[in-house]
């Protein structure tokens, strides 16, 4: 008989090993999946994980993409992980990301065609505030009425998507765009453009903010009393109240941080890689970031690595679609599998397997 | 013998380290309401679990209506005609009454027939209940009726009720008693578990008193005074308390007319509590579990803020302050539940030091945690209180109960509190550790700290307290010097009879 036995303490070794194990299992099962789709499994895995970085033919183009894709994922995932540590489940980062983009772009476009140096900082602040405000809706509803933040934040994603559709064909539509939906291209407006800071690296302001967020979250969670209170709330809510933590403040803080970071990510995306507000500028980063947060063990450094890995599967996935004619859905399945295997192998962090007939009482 | 329904002979059940029941024998007659009386930990629930087939006795035997009775599981007990209403209900909030009742039956009839049977039984026994109501909308008393009707539909010969009145209003208690008397008149036997003496005297024909797993006596409660019952329940096995002469200072903590609503369905409201503790004094608060101990600790620690003007620390009103501000002012506390309340199970002892000592030990400065200072403080607690652990980096849940208790008590004591509130300081702790903790508390009081010790261990309270008061249903008796009290009076105070005795107060 196989039994699970609770470990006296969470295993440090398994905490580090499970993400690697999850990646390996995803490769194996993903390979089988690709084989069923008629592709060479080894070739497909190599196309996803190896070619974007090292293939002499594409690497020059795909390598900078790594940071472009990883930046928003890391920025959003850092915010989410802080909430997740406290047991506050913001599933609606995608909505906060969209609202950050709209507010950031909107704040700047209000001053078009000014070339003031204040435009870009204003847009950053507006982007962060937009995401923050959108996250405050589930936060206030939860603290006031005890609603479930998972449902409210998720539903607000669909509201945000509809607002996006509305403004891109209405309020923010490019007046010189001959009636096509979509805002002015911010990349072509120097005061608002978020371009590569170092050529051919993919490094833009969003990536800089992502790195700052990683460091900030690390300091917050390991050194600052608020970070301690956040972890305490997640670990033992009653002990947190006994310690003097006010649960409503933690809810507002965590949702506020994750909303603001998601909003920032949205703004940097729309002013940089995407270039304009359009109906489908968002690439689902807000949802993928949930996987990144868990894959990175809700730890800032882990999230940094997980964000890079997930960016790699995005780029590699596109490459695989192009080169091997794999359907786009199979790539999403592949990313989903990563989270699935991570959660499955996670059991070993807190439990060990005992084989044999032990005493059951 | 003919009139005996259930006969227990020499029932013994041992758990590792504890004899829960030791050679318990008594009979329950047909149509008799039999009380099972005892303090927490006296072995009442183990005994009942054996009768209901949840636990197998190590030794001894039972006969039901003359036939050998040894249920291996509750369904066998139910088949034999033994039903039980638990203290905590097992009902699904989202389902209606009839669906909940059907879930508890081996072979439920069609829903329309069942609804009719529920209505019939509820009318016959005066338990108003609509079978189509959703359970989530019912009061605690109505939920209990669902459980009772679920049992009555099986037409039991013996109905076991575990502390049924703890969740009821006085009016609901009257309705319940009418039902039980009606059942009795129809020949159903009832085993009624309680520690409320007046209730038992009013309702029960016979009472068996358990203390420390052994039967003390079987008596007729209507012919026994509450005083005698209390004495049997509490026992007078410990030495007469000595008067302690301590230098008492000014009033450190004063509670004036503190009332708070119950925090949840099973919580106890605090009703108009008043007391004061002076520097250097130990106030012991006794009482049976669930009479407001946790709620009192939460109100004093600041976890729940109190109405303005009800909690005063050294002459300042701290009622509206939270735990952090009260700690800063010198009011510290240690709750009963070590894991999850006093300490975060998965966090290290160092992190758990920051949990309460952040401010007073300057472990947190300008919002930043000084981990090396926290580690030093954790190590100091470990050394001074002899906490057995590989080191301060170990997670709290890896420590044994006694060691963790020494750690959380030590953590508060080493912060030099002006007032310390402590709930169940030695609960589940081995004798040596318990003695060490008590000594540390006495030393703290000798140093001028005002202590409030809430405990269910009377020996402990008598040993360390200067004055004693008892909590009963969220009310606090007046506090009397321990030296003036005997076990009878303590038992009466705990049973809630302090009001009628107040005129004889010394």
Image (cartoon, coloured by chain):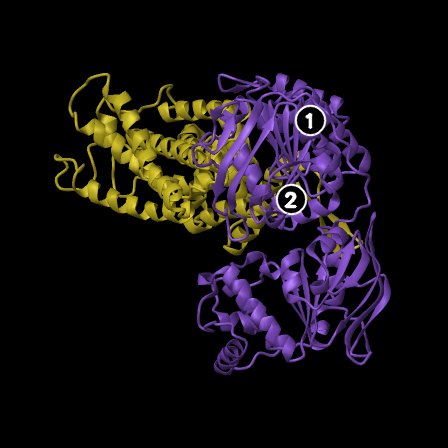
Chain colours: A yellow, B purple
Relative horizontal placement of residue B336, taking residue A192 as reference (left or right): right
Mark 2 Cα-neighbour bin, 10 Å: few <14, some 14–19, many ≥20: few
As drawn, B498 above or below B482: below
The quarter of the picture where the C terminus of chain A appears is bottom right
The chain to which mark 1 is attached is: B
Relative to B167, say whether A245 is above or below. Answer: above
Residue A326 image offset from top left, x and y in percent: 45, 49
Q: Secondary structure at mark 2?
A: helix
Residue B462 spot, x, y in % from top left: 73, 37
Where is residue B35? Give x, y as percent: 70, 64
The chain letter for the residue carrying disc 2 is B
Q: Quadrant of residue A168?
A: top left
Q: Position of residue A233 (x, y in %)?
A: 52, 36
Query: What is the count of numbered marks?
Result: 2
> Would you identify the image quadrant in which residue B145 lies?
bottom right
Decide: few, some or many residues near mark 1? Use Cα within 10 Å; few <14, some 14-19, many ≥20.
Answer: many
* Residue at screen point 67% across, 18% down: B376
Horizontal arrangement in the rendering, residue A241 relative to residue B67 (left or right)? left
Residue at 24% from the left image edge and 45% from the top image edge: A165
Which residue: 56% across, 28% down?
B253
Q: Determine contact: label 2, label 1, CB under 8 Å.
A: no
User: What residue is pinned by disc 2?
Assistant: B504
Query: What quarter of the picture does the N terminus of chain A occupy?
Result: bottom right
Q: Is residue B211 visible?
A: yes
A6 or B168, nearer to the observer: B168
Of the residues tagged 2 and 1, which is closer to the observer?
Answer: 2
Residue B428 appears in the figure: no
Earlier along the polypeptide chain: callout 2 or callout 1? 1
Q: Nearer the viewer, residue B45 or A138?
A: B45
Residue at coordinates 73% horizontally, 34% vertically from top-left? B483
Camera-side residue: B66 or B95? B66
* Numbered badge on residue B410: 1
């Amino acid at each position: 008989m196989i039994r699970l036995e609770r470990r006296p303490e969470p295993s440090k070794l398994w905490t580090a090993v499970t993400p690697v194990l999850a990646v390996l299992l995803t490769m194996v099962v993903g390979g089988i999946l690709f084989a069923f789709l008629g592709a060479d499994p080894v070739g497909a895995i190599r196309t996803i994980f190896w070619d974007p970085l090292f293939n002499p033919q594409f690497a020059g183009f795909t390598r900078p993409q790594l940071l472009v894709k990883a930046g928003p994922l890391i920025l959003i995932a850092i915010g989410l992980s802080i909430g997740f540590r406290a047991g506050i489940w913001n599933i609606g980062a995608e909505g906060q990301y969209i609202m950050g983009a709209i507010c950031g772009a909107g704040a700047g476009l209000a001053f078009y065609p000014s070339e003031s140096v204040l435009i870009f900082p204003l847009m950053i602040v507006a982007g962060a505030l937009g995401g923050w405000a959108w996250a405050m809706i589930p936060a206030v509803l939860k603290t006031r009425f005890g609603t479930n933040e998972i449902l409210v934040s998720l539903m607000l994603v669909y509201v945000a998507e509809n607002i996006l559709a509305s403004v891109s064909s209405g309020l923010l539509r490019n007046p010189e765009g001959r009636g096509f939906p979509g805002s002015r291209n911010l990349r072509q407006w120097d005061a608002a453009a978020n371009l590569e800071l170092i050529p051919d690296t993919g490094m833009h302001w969003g990536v800089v903010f992502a790195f700052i967020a990683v460091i900030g979250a690390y300091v917050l969670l390991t050194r600052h009393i608020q970070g301690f209170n956040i972890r305490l709330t997640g670990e033992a809510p009653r002990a947190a109240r006994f310690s003097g933590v006010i649960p409503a403040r933690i809810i507002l803080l965590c949702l506020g941080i994750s909303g603001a970071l998601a909003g920032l990510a949205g703004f940097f995306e729309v002013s940089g890689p995407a270039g304009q507000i359009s109906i489908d500028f968002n690439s689902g980063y807000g949802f993928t970031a949930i996987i990144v947060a868990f894959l990175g063990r809700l730890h800032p450094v882990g999230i940094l690595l997980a964000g890079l890995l997930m960016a790699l599967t995005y780029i590699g996935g596109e490459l695989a679609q192009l080169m091997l004619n794999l359907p786009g859905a199979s790539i999403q399945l592949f990313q989903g599998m990563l989270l699935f295997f991570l959660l499955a192998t996670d059991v070993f962090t807190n439990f060990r397997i005992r084989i044999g007939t032990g005493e059951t009482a | 013998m003919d009139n005996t329904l259930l006969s227990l002979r020499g029932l013994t059940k041992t758990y590792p380290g504890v004899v829960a029941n030791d050679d318990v024998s008594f009979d329950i007659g047909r149509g008799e309401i039999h009380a099972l009386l005892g303090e927490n930990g006296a072995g009442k629930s183990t005994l009942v679990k054996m009768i209901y087939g949840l636990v197998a006795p190590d030794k001894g035997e039972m006969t039901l209506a003359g036939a050998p009775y040894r249920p291996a599981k509750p369904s066998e007990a139910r088949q034999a005609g033994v039903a039980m209403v638990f203290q905590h209900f097992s009902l699904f909030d989202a389902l209606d009454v009839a669906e909940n009742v059907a879930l508890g039956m081996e072979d439920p009839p069609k829903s329309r027939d069942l609804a009719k049977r529920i209505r019939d039984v509820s009318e016959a026994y005066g338990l108003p209940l609509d079978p189509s109501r959703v359970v989530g909308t019912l009061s605690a008393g109505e939920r209990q009726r669902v459980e009772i009707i679920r049992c009555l539909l099986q037409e039991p010969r013996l109905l076991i009720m575990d502390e049924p009145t703890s969740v009821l209003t006085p009016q609901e208690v009257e309705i319940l008693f009418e039902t039980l008397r009606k059942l009795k008149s129809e020949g159903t036997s009832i085993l009624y578990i309680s520690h409320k003496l007046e209730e038992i005297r009013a309702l029960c024909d016979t009472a068996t008193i358990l203390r420390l797993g052994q039967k003390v006596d079987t008596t007729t409660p209507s012919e026994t005074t509450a005083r005698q019952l209390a004495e049997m329940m509490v026992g007078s096995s410990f030495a007469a308390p000595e008067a302690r002469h301590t230098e008492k200072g000014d009033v450190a903590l004063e509670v004036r007319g503190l009332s708070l609503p119950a925090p949840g369905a099973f919580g106890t409201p605090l009703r108009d509590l008043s007391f004061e503790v002076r520097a250097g004094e130990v106030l012991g608060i006794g009482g049976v579990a669930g009479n407001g101990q946790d709620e009192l600790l939460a109100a004093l620690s600041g976890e729940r803020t109190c109405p303005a003007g009800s909690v005063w620390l050294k002459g300042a009103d701290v009622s509206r302050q939270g735990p952090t501000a009260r700690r800063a002012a010198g009011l510290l506390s240690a709750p009963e539940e070590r894991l999850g309340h006093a300490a975060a199970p998965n966090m290290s002892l160092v992190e758990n030091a920051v949990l309460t000592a952040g401010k007073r030990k300057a472990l947190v400065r300008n919002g930043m945690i000084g981990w090396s200072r926290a580690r030093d403080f954790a190590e100091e607690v470990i050394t001074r209180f002899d906490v057995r652990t590989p080191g301060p980096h170990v997670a709290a849940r890896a420590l044994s109960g006694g060691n963790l208790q020494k750690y959380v008590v030590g953590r508060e004591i080493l912060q030099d509190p002006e007032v310390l509130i402590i709930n169940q300081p030695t609960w589940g702790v081995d004798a040596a550790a318990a003695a060490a903790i008590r000594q540390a508390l006495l030393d703290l009081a000798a140093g001028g700290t005002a202590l409030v010790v809430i405990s269910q261990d009377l020996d402990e309270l008598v040993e360390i307290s200067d004055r004693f008061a008892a909590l009963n249903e969220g009310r606090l008796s007046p506090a009397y010097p321990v030296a003036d009290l005997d076990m009878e009076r303590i038992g009466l105070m705990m049973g809630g009879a302090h009001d009628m005795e107040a005129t004889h107060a010394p």
